[in-house]
Amino acid sequence: MKTNDYVKYMTQEIIKYMNTPRDERKEHKQEKMETKPPLSQRMFGVLPFGFSMMFKKHHRDRHK
């Protein structure tokens, strides 16, 4: 991609962003935040979830 193409693309994106109403941008941002997985899962995948399940099971079995 040439520099001129990149500048053109960025200009189009900025104009598109500026033309959308503020309320619509906030709604879009809120929807995006709601569908985002937890930080631990985004950073490390499924491993933290698996470890938490393992520790919960271990803790539950130990206190019976």
Image: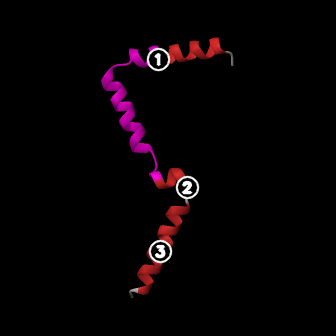
Amino acid of disc 1 = Ile
Q: What's the distance in space between the residues labelled 1 and 2, CA to CA?
A: 32 Å
**Residue at x 39%, y 43% (from the top left corner):** 34
Rendered view: 52 above or below 42: below
Residue farthest left in this picture: 23
Image quarter of residue 61: bottom left
Q: Is residue 27 left or right of residue 2?
A: left
* Residue in the foreground of this view, choosing between 2 and 42: 2
Q: Is residue 47 magenta?
A: no
**Magenta: main secondary structure:** helix
Residue type pointed to by label 3: Phe
Please state the horizontal and vertical placement of residue 27, each as a whole percent of the image.
34, 31
For the rendered model, the colour scheme is secondary structure
Instruction: Say whether marks 3 and 1 touch (CB < 8 Å).
Output: no
Q: Which residue is mark 3?
A: 55
Q: Residue at x 38, y 33 (%)?
A: 29
Q: Quadrant of residue 15?
A: top left
Whichever of labels 3 and 1 marks the residue nearer the N terminus, that label is 1
Q: Which residues are magenta?
A: 14-39
How many numbered badges does the structure rendering display? 3
Residue 22 spot, x, y in % from top left: 32, 22
Element at label 3: helix
Which badge, 2 or 3, comes first in the chain's sequence?
A: 2
Neighbour class for label 2 at 10 Å: few (<14), some, many (≥20)? Answer: few
Q: Position of residue 50 (x, y in %)?
A: 53, 66
> Which residue is disc 2 drawn over?
44
In the rendered image, the quadrant that contains the N terminus is top right
Location of residue 50 with respect to 64 vertically, above or below: above
Label 1: element kind? helix
Q: CA distance from mark 2 to mark 3?
A: 17 Å
Using the image, tell me which numbered label, if any, was put on residue 14. 1
Q: Earlier in the sequence, mark 1 or mark 2?
A: 1
